[in-house]
């Protein structure tokens, strides 16, 4: 059986003086919410202090679970982070083509 998973990619710029607060809030408030979501598998987060960018990828069992999270939970997360961010996060979704970790193969 073919294994299909989805990933949500979020990119945002945070205020220069808010880096530590961004990391703390993400770890203490955002990650616990993600872990409670049905179909959630993993979260990878990246920070670039020089560019003041944050980039994250959340992994989901199905597109439906990712979409449900985007509709029902993500708006509250965005609200929690708005005082820290310099812009509106850019969100994109993808079907995962290949993964050695999740053993997904496009062909």
Image (spheres, helix red, strand yellow):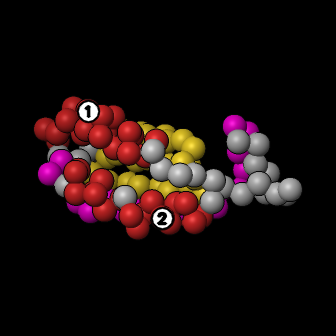
Q: Residues within 10 Å of mark 1 (few under 14, many from 20)?
A: few
Horizontal and vertical percent for residue 25? 25, 38
Q: Report the residue at 70% width, 42% height from top.
A: 102
Horizontal and vertical percent for residue 12? 32, 54
Horizontal and vertical percent for residue 75? 31, 62
Horizontal and vertical percent for residue 82? 19, 55
Does residue 100 appear to the left or right of 93 in the view shown?
right
Mark in the foreground, 2 or 1: 2
Task: Let me know if residue 94 appears in the view.
Answer: no
Q: Report the residue at 33% width, 34% height from top.
A: 27
What stretch of residues is rendered in magenta? 83-101
Quadrant housing the C terminus: bottom right
Task: Let me know if residue 105 appears in the view.
Answer: yes
Name the image quarter holding residue 64: bottom right
Local secondary structure at mark 2: helix
The magenta stretch spans residue 94: yes
Q: Is residue 23 above or below residue 106?
A: above
Residue under pointer 1: 24
Depth check, front residue: 38 or 104: 38
Depth check, front residue: 80 or 51: 80
Q: Kindly identify which numbered label has been placed on residue 68.
A: 2
Give whichever of discs 2 and 1 has the lower sequence position: 1
Q: Report the residue at 77% width, 54% height from top.
A: 3
């Amino acid at each position: 059986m073919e294994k299909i998973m989805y990933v949500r990619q979020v990119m945002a710029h945070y205020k220069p003086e808010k880096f530590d607060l961004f990391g703390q809030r993400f770890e203490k408030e955002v990650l616990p919410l993600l872990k409670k979501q049905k179909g959630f598998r993993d979260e990878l987060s990246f920070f670039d202090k020089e560019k003041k960018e944050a980039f994250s990828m959340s992994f989901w069992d199905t597109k439906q679970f990712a979409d449900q999270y985007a509709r029902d939970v993500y708006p509250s997360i965005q609200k929690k982070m708005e005082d820290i961010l310099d812009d509106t996060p850019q969100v994109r979704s993808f079907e995962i083509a290949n993964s050695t970790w999740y053993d997904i193969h496009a062909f």
